Image (spheres, rainbow, N blue to C red):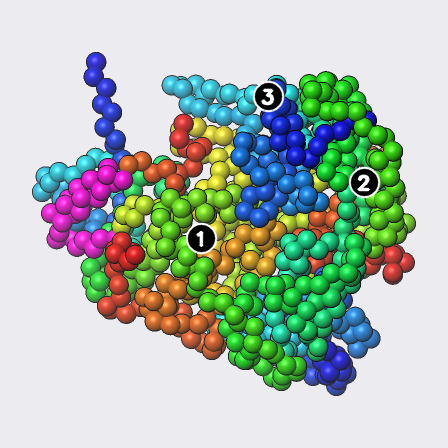
Amino acid sequence: MLKIAKKDLASLFALIKESGELYLPVKVAEQTNFAAYEDGAEFDLDTLKSVKSPKDVFFPQSETLYTCKNEGKTIKITPEELVDQPFVVFGMKACDVGGIEVLDRVFLSDPVDSFYAARRAHGTIVALACHEPEESCFCKVFGIDAAEPVADVATWMIGDELYWKALTEKGEALTEKVSSLLTDADEQVVENEKTAIRAIIEKLPYSDLSLEGWNGDAVAEKFDSKLWNELYKPCLACGTCTFVCPTCQCYDIKDYNTGSSVQRYRCWDSCMYSDFTMMAHGNNRTSQMQRFRQRFMHKLVYFPANNDGTYSCVGCGRCVDKCPASLNIVKVIKAFGEKGE
Amino acid sequence: MQELITRAKELLENGTVARVLGWKIGDLPYNPEPAFFETAESLDKFVYNGFCGANLSKYMIEASKLEGKTLVCLKPCDTYSFNQLLTEHRVDRDKAYIIGVGCKGKLDVEKIKKTGIKGIVSISGAEADSACDTLEIDTLYGKKSCAYGDAMLERCHVCKGKEHKIYDELIGESRDTADKERFAEVEMIEAMSPEEKFAFFQKELSKCIRCNACRNVCPACSCRKCVFDSNKFDSAQKANVDSFEEKMFHIIRAFHVAGRCTDCGECSRVCPQGIPLHLFNRKFIKDIDELYGDYTAGAEAGSLAPLTDFKMDDAEPSIVNERG
Amino acid sequence: MSVNNEFKPKIVAFCCNWCSYAGADLAGSSRLAYPADVKIIRVPCSCRVNPMFILRAFEKGADGVIICGCHPGDCHYSTGNYYARRRMTLLFSMLDYIGVEKGRARVEWVSAAEGVKFADTMNSFVSKIKDLGENVRLGDIRCKN
């Protein structure tokens, strides 16, 4: 166990930045989101949850895949280069790391997504334990321990010090690079913090949420439930829940005409949108009820069916915080639980 | 609130209305959701308190297509939106039974959280009947308190007034919450240099994630198919590649509702990134007032909106270069 | 070899079919000179110009956008230009509000008989845009290469 004083974090970040890009929670106009750290930017490790999850470090909201340009009578296609430089993400929470594990299952299984794989290969994740979990958190329900994040490096912010523990080879390598700033620390302090965090988690209102009945085998039973007809009604069909979610992985591929070339890019898509999975024959989900159902069926039924029972929700609670109509996955799970469906 | 529930039950049972559109109690102290109630028993979950900020007029567009009347609870500012939708023939007056509900200012949990309060277990003082000046908040990290005014939505600080513009009956009391100049923020921006203005909006709009919440919640945004959703048109860019896309989206969004926007503030309320979107709408309102005479969208049903009207001697567009 | 570094602005002119477009025609047949940087888009009426057209033009690389219509009172459809006048006033005011230089977009009334005014207007607009320089704030970086 190592540590560094909180006031020295700026030098730590400067040192990490010397050998590559550093992403961390940065406050811009009152809101905290993960962004590439630049000198003078205001980093914010106190806000528990960034508005957007940090998934966009590995899976950006928009990224160009290739560019087509007319050159005489031929079309020149230039693929976008893959990330080939190491970078560090600092301050991801246990749930955010869990989100990346869900994305790994999608993008790193066959066929491997080369853009995502390149970022995963070059990125080192420094996770930060949740000092004071909030009422919308329910990571415990999905077996995630906010007190002890599992990443390349795990850190804890306790009082005026940041405790640091490398967990993987990548983590060791990073620790080596910044070792001049770290000093030895007492393991017990961190153990106490973990106990304190876990005690709070026990008291969170959503910690006893039951996922009973939600599994890969429940397709027909859940799909046909009449409850969806009620539940979806307040939904405004915006994409907030999907865009702040750490596990939503659906994207659209589009072309942008720059006037002199065409850029083919992909961007996050939302199952809440009317043109989601639009095909030549039209759309296979024609009502908002169907779109709404899709989101929760995907997270709690289809995904576990195809991924050894893993849910594609990590309980970060961002949708709980941000939904304009105060709908969220917890209310859906509870509604089914109450009706015994 | 009890009076409201009793009356709603009565109207449901005597068949005046087929359903009630209100708010259902949430599972956290601050997250009630808009809901339709079709039976008297289901009204046990009805709630109306300081966190019922959602403007239910928007839901009346769909409810107007249903069989029978819908009892809808509208706050004073929501009635402007309802009137505006009536003007545009998007809701059916005969399908609505409007109960004008009292409003003591609506709360924004984000504002409470910004004061450093977290782990909220319960909140008292936000009840519709007995709204206090201070919210007592029980949290996992101890007891906290927050002044009601500090937790209020921006829109309530510039409230248009506690008078309901359209209703069948009124239940509950309202209080005056306006304590700020409505156009002060707009004027502050107008006074900036072009570089400062640009930097300000660049910074705010760089946060936009194109989730469309501002558009979808807007009671004035009632097109069946939005131009930004059309896949036949180049504007359907979900991308977040360059800040200009966001600027165009927000300018067009505000422009399309210019003269129709009642300044209900829903866009700013729902923005997950806290972008002060009302600054766009309010700029249009201010310009319209200054150039074409005071106009309040939704103050009365059937009024002619400024952008579907003109005068022979209107100002020329070049006036923009002459003004400050 | 000499390199001409002079800034050549890209100008989009939306011209109403009934007045300004005919005015442009007259300017041409009268052999009046105006810069070739002006690209004319013919529209049925100045009020056909959706604010989105203007923003789109800027996004795709225009340095200035001008909308020309019939003089107020002379609209082929009686009142179209009156509506256009209000819309454009509000839009230009919004552009100013978000920090775009004043004068990048303009509205002028040019009748079919005013070939000279058309040429003069274009000359003055182009010179104004030259003074303002390249449109950076409303352009999309993807269109710059």
Q: Tell which subunit mark 3 falls on.
A: A
Question: Which residue is painted at 9% across and 42% down in the image?
Answer: C30
Viewer-nearest of discs 2 and 3: 3
Real-space CA distance between mark 2 and mark 1, rounded to the nearest whole angstrom = 42 Å
Q: Position of residue A144 (x, y in %)?
A: 83, 39
Q: Nearer the viewer, residue A327 or B290?
A: B290
Real-space CA distance between mark 3 and mark 1, rounded to the nearest whole angstrom = 42 Å
Q: Nearer the viewer, residue C72 or A330?
A: A330
Q: Amino acid at mark 2?
A: Ala
Range shown magenta: C107-132
Viewer-nearest of discs 2 and 1: 2
Q: Are marks 2 and 3 on the same chain?
A: yes
Q: Amino acid at mark 1?
A: Ile
Instruction: Look at mark 1 in the image and give the residue it sits on.
Output: B252
Instruction: Look at mark 2 in the image and give the residue it sits on.
Output: A146
Q: Secondary structure at mark 3?
A: helix
Q: Position of residue B162 (x, y in %)?
A: 55, 78
Question: Which residue is painted at 55% across and 23% down in the image?
Answer: A80
